[in-house]
Image: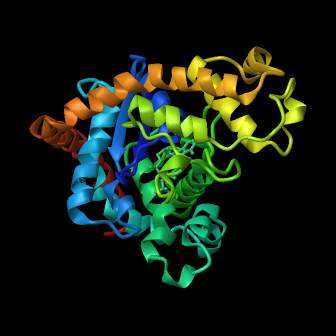
Amino acid sequence: MKKKIFSGVQPTGNLHLGNYLGAIKNFVSLSNDNENECIFCVVDLHAITVTQDPAILRENIRETVATFIASGIDPKKSIIFNQSQVVAHAEAAWILSCTAKMGWLNRMTQFKEKAGKDKEKASVGLYSYPILMAADILLYDSTHVPVGNDQKQHLELCRDIAQKFNNDFKVDDFFKIPEPLIQKEFSRIMSLKDGSKKMSKSDLSDLSRINLTDEKDEILNKIKKAKTDSLSIPTNIKEFVDRPEARNLIGIYSSLASMTFEDTIQKFSGKNFSELKENLSQILIDNLNPISNEIKKLLKEKSYLDKILEDGCQKADNIASKKIKKIHDIVGF
Ligand code: AQP
C-alpha cells in the first residue's frame, strides 16, 4: 500500500534552517519516492493564531510555496495547497474540538511556550491549534507525518483524537492513525544565540537563525557570531553535557553533510571552534545558496505560484470534501 504523507508549514516568514533540516529536507526525499503520495500544506489558518499583517501574510504564503519548490518538491508529483482554501479543514477542526478533551490540550507544551507568561491574552486559536492540525492530517487518511521533533506532542494528540472519534462513533479504522516521521539523528535545530531555545521564525534576533534566503555574507556573519564556549570541541558524546551550543553546531554540520553525529565529532574533535565554523559556513553556503537563489527567482513569478496553489487546492478539496461528507453522516448531521 502507498504511504500517504501529509505535512504543513506556517507561512509566517523567515523560513529557516530548522524548518529545512527538521522538516522540508525530509519532505523532499519522501516526495521523490514513487511509493508515496504526498500532500504539503501551507497552513495559513495556523498562521493567524498570532497577529499577521494581511499583505505580508499573502506574500509569505507565496514564499512558502516557492521554498517547497526551490528545495526540490515537484508540484506535478505532490499536492501543494493552502489550508484556508479548503473549507473542510476549519469544519473538521470544529467537529474534532468536540471530541478532544480540555485536559489533553492543557498538556501541550507549545502553547505554554508560545503564550508565555500572559496566557490570558493568547488567542483561543493558539490554544486549539493542535486540533486544527489533527483535522489537517486526518482529512487525508494520512499514514505518515514528517515533522520536526517540536511537533511530536501534537501528533500524539492527533492520534488520541482519531482513536477517540473512532471509538465514540464505533467506526473502527475510519480515521487512520498516523505515524510521525521524525529525523532520527538530529531533529531539533537550536538558536545560534542560545542552545537551549529552538531556532524559530519569531525570535526577535535575526542572528539566532539562518534564513533560507540569507546571502553568503549573512551566513558567514551569523556563524561567526554564533555562541560557543571557551573550550575546544569535545572528543566524544559524553563531553557535550552542558554544552548545548557546541552540540548544535556539530549537529547542524552532521545533518548537512549526511554524517553521523559520532563521525562529525571525530572530524572536529579537539579542534577549536573557528575551524568548525569555517567548515560549517562553507557547507551551509553550498547547501543553501542554490535554494535561496531559486526562491528569489520564483518569487518574481507570482502567477506561477498562484496557479500551483489553485491546482493543489482543487486536488486537496476533492479528497477532503469526500471525507467531511462521511464525517457528517457519522456524527448525525
Ligand atoms: N528549530 C527547529 N528544528 C527542527 N525542526 C523545526 N521546525 C520548526 N522549527 C524547527 C519544523 O518545521 C516545520 C514547520 O514549522 P512551522 O512553521 O509550521 O511551525 P513552528 O514549529 O512553530 O516553526 P517556528 O520556526 O518555531 O515558527 P514560530 O517562531 O512562528 O513558532 C514543522 O514540522 C516543525 O516541526
Is 209 displayed left or right of 46 in the figure?
right
Compared to 31, does 143 lie above or below? below
Is 157 displayed left or right of 128 in the figure?
right
**Quarter of the rendering occupied by the C terminus:** bottom left
Compared to 298, does 1 lie above or below? above
Colour setup of the view? rainbow
The front one of 170 and 43 is 43
The residue at 65%/73% (across/down) is: 103
Is 112 displayed left or right of 323 in the figure?
right
Residue extending farthest to the left is: 303
The front one of 219 and 30 is 219
The front one of 226 and 169 is 226
The percent position of residue 196, horizontal first and vertical second, equals 71, 52
Number of marks in the rendered image? 0
The percent position of residue 33, horizontal first and vertical second, equals 43, 17
The percent position of residue 286, horizontal first and vertical second, equals 46, 19
The front one of 116 and 128 is 116
